[in-house]
Each structure stands twice: as C-alpha cells, then as structure tokens.
Amino acid sequence: MGDKQQDTAGASAGKRATLRDVARLAGVSHQTVSRAINDKGEIDPETRRRVLDAARQLHYRPSRFARGLVRPGATTVGLIVSDVVNPFFPELIAGVLEAAEQRGWQVLVASTQDDPGREPQLLRSLAGQVDALIGYLFQPDDVVAAAVEGVPLVVMSRRAREAAFGSVDIDLETGVRAAVRHLVARGHQRIGMIDCPDAADPARKAIFLAEAEDQGLPVPPDAIIGVEQSMAGGESGFEKLHAARPELTAMFAFNDLIALGAYRAARRAGLAIPDDVALLGFDGLNLGELLDPPLTTIAIDKRRMGELAVAEVQRLLAGEPGGLALVETELLIRGSA
C-alpha cells in the first residue's frame, strides 16, 4: 500500500480527518491547506486543486471553530496570553484587536490560565486554524517551534532565539535602572526587591542588582525574595522581606500586581507609605492610581505592545525575517515612592 493510500485509510478508519491529514496527502503545509480551503489568494491554481482533491478524498470537514468563527478569506491571528483576568493583559489584547481591525484581520484569543504546560497543546490547536500567532509564552523557543510547525509567530515580552520568530520586548534595562535611580534620588540607601523568578522576563533582578552596584548600594541576598506572580505573592513577599530586613526603606516590585499585594501587606502591618517604606512597581497599571497615595511605577504602553506585535505579524506574512520591536518605559512618579 502506498503512502497516500495509508494516509487515506488512516484518516477514514480512525478519527475525523484533520487539516494536517489533508496537508500530508496533498504534500503541502497546513497553512497552504487553510488558504486553499478558505479561497485566499497567493496560491497556485494547481496547488489549490490538489488540496481540494485531497480534502474530498479524505471527506475533510473544517471544524466547528473554523466554520463558525473564522471568516473565509480573512487573515486570522491567534493570540495567546497567560491570564485574561490579570489586569496587565486587557490593554495588550485591545491593542492587538485594534491594530488587526485596521488591517481587516480577525483575532482569536486564548488563555493558558497561568499554566505554561498548556502552551504546546494550545499552540498546536490554534496553528491549524490561523495564519499567524502572537504569544505571551513561557516555554523555550525549541518547544514553541515544534508546536507551531512553521506558522508565523511573534513572541511577547522576550527576545526570540528562533530566527523565524518575531519579537516584541520591553526596554527593561532603561526601566529598572530608572526605578533604582529614582529611589536613590529620594534618599533611599537600603532597597530590597520582590521578584518573580518564574516570569517570562527574569532579567529584572539582574538589572536591579547591576544598577544598585553602580549606585554603590549593597544588596544582601536576603534583600531579594522570589514569589509567585499574584497579589497574594506580593503580600507574602513583603511580609517575609520586611521580617528578614526590617531596615529596608524601599522595595522595588517585579510588577504592579506584586506591588499592590505588598502595599496591602504594608498597610496591614501599620506602616506608612512612603514614610516608613516606599514601594515602586513596574507595568503602569491603572489600578495603581486608585491607591492612596497612588503607586509610583515604571509604565509600559501595553496597547502599543499589541500594535507592534501585529506589525511584526504583517512583516512575517510578507515573507520578511523575524525582527525585534522594543517598547519604551516611563517612570510615573505618583505618591508611593
């Protein structure tokens, strides 16, 4: 039995034929199958005929997801974030949606629910439905590359090592150094950090330590504590750090979510902010403005991140190599530091 006969038998004898089954039988990529079935341009007529013949031979039916949510002929981008409830992501998602709409594209949004282990399966699932992907991902590039199988991908808040990927990263170097310099300018000489070592961009701690050294500030190992990325993590981190190093007059938090938890723990301990302890976050969440005093932070234009990711997707779809877009940071001096 030949290879094509085996493919046909395998698809009909088992589960319903998939887009990848059609791609194998036609001898093309699954992106080509998607474009042929959705009658998109840029495909040779003979290739389209071969794909459609393979689809008929396998009795391929597009999934309910593809039939119901994906407009025929439209460029579709899959967006994966770790947690849609995390206040960091709504603005980023809005930026992607707005930039995609300007191009007549559509976006399918999915969440890993803060479980990096779900990323490969989710990437594989979306890769069969979309023309390109944008992902706020934690898995290493080789794992991601195996999951997307050649679908154009832009990674967020990191710099891809895979040459085929596009990247949108944050200018952490400028932002973190500005945070430390601001605290020093306010007279703080004993500064600690509440870190998130499992986050997608672990460089913040290294930059914090480098700037502290440049400023001549000693930072003992127990003046930095690692926590999970949540408000509860910020609370427990502040409590442990304050207990271990009560002489600290300022703390830099990995992000605003951590800083919000630290803020709550400091208030519960009866500490005045910023007189007893100054707190400085990172991200520029609007929630920080609701505190009294408001949270001083390093702000990121999260909508701009989304816009840049869509622009990188457009470059990849045009056949250009993966590039790097850098999002600037800005020190927002409010009242907590």
Image: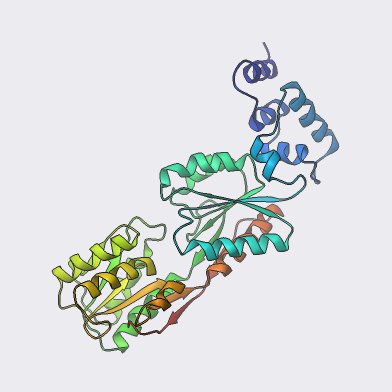
Residue found at the far right of this picture:
45
Q: Residue 216's spot in the image, x, y percent?
A: 24, 82
| Position of residue 286 in the picture relative to residue 176 (left or right) | right
Residue at 55%, 66% (x, y): give it: 305
Colouring: rainbow
In the rendered image, the vertical position of residue 66 relative to residue 287, given as above or below? above
**Quadrant in which the C terminus appears:** bottom left
Q: Residue 249's spot in the image, x, y percent?
A: 22, 81
Residue at 73%, 60% (x, y): give it: 103
Front residue of this view, candidates 104 and 53: 104
- Residue 201, image quadrant: bottom left
| Position of residue 109 in the picture relative to residue 47 (left or right) | left
* Residue 169 visible in the displayed image: yes
In the rendered image, the vertical position of residue 70 relative to residue 323, given as above or below? above
Residue at 60%, 56% (x, y): give it: 322
**Quadrant in which the N terminus appears:** top right
- Residue 336, image quadrant: bottom left
| Position of residue 163 in the picture relative to residue 329 (left or right) | right
Q: Residue 97's spot in the image, x, y percent?
A: 63, 60
* Residue 284 visible in the displayed image: no
The total of numbered circles placed on residues is 0
Front residue of this view, candidates 79 and 64: 64
In the rendered image, the vertical position of residue 247 relative to residue 46, given as above or below? below
Front residue of this view, candidates 235 and 57: 235
